[in-house]
Amino acid sequence: QVQLVESGGGLVQTGGSLRLSCAASGSIASINDMGWYRQAPGKQRDVVATITSFGYTDYADSVKGRFTISRDNAKNTVYLQMNSLKPEDTAVYYCKAEGVQRLSYFASWGQGTQVTVSS
């Protein structure tokens, strides 16, 4: 089983920055796509940013130019640098990883980390 552990959430003022980290562990053969998603109270979970194993990135329109996703393949870790934070960025942020574990495909989620942006 692949476990994802997130860290880096917290409380920040409008305009501030936070950096989220998510480390994957387990019997991992390879990780293909990694990504960050968020869910605000009463809303569905939406994609924030994704990154492939080759480093191709994609972002939600609402975070383009403010957030940067990156990964360290040697550490099986994905990061989300969040700058110019806004109150509407407040949500629980989840990381997701998809890949191959032993001979089977996996898709795992982290437990979530709270990000709160005060106005």
Image (cartoon, rainbow, N blue to C red):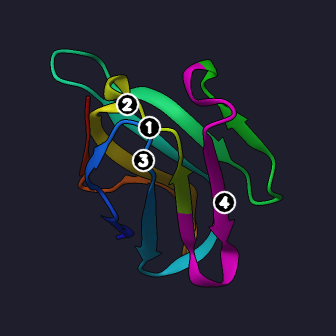
Q: How far apart are marks 1 and 3 (CA)?
A: 5 Å
In the image, taking residue 96 as reference, residue 111 lies left or right, namely: left
Res. 91 image quadrant: top left
Q: Is mark 1 on a helix, strand or loop?
A: loop
**Residue at left offset 44%, top offset 66%:** 21
Which amino acid type is marked by label 3?
A: Gly
Q: Name the residue under label 1.
A: 85
The disc label shown at residue 16, or none: 3
Q: Mark 4 points at which residue?
A: 70
Q: How far apart are marks 2 and 1 (CA)?
A: 6 Å
Viewer-nearest of discs 2 and 1:
1
Q: How far apart are marks 4 and 1 (CA)?
A: 18 Å
**Quick check: marks 3 and 2 in contact, CB under 8 Å?**
no
Q: Distance between the residues labelled 2 and 4?
A: 19 Å
Q: How far apart are marks 4 and 3 (CA)?
A: 19 Å
Q: Mark 2 points at which residue?
A: 89
Which amino acid type is marked by label 2?
A: Asp
Residue 67 magenta-highlighted: yes
* Residue range highlighted in magenta: 62-78
Q: What element carries label 2?
A: helix
Residue 32 appears in view: no
In the image, taking residue 119 as reference, residue 106 lies left or right, namely: right
Depth check: 115 or 53 in front?
Answer: 115
In the image, taking residue 56 as reference, residue 107 lies left or right, namely: left
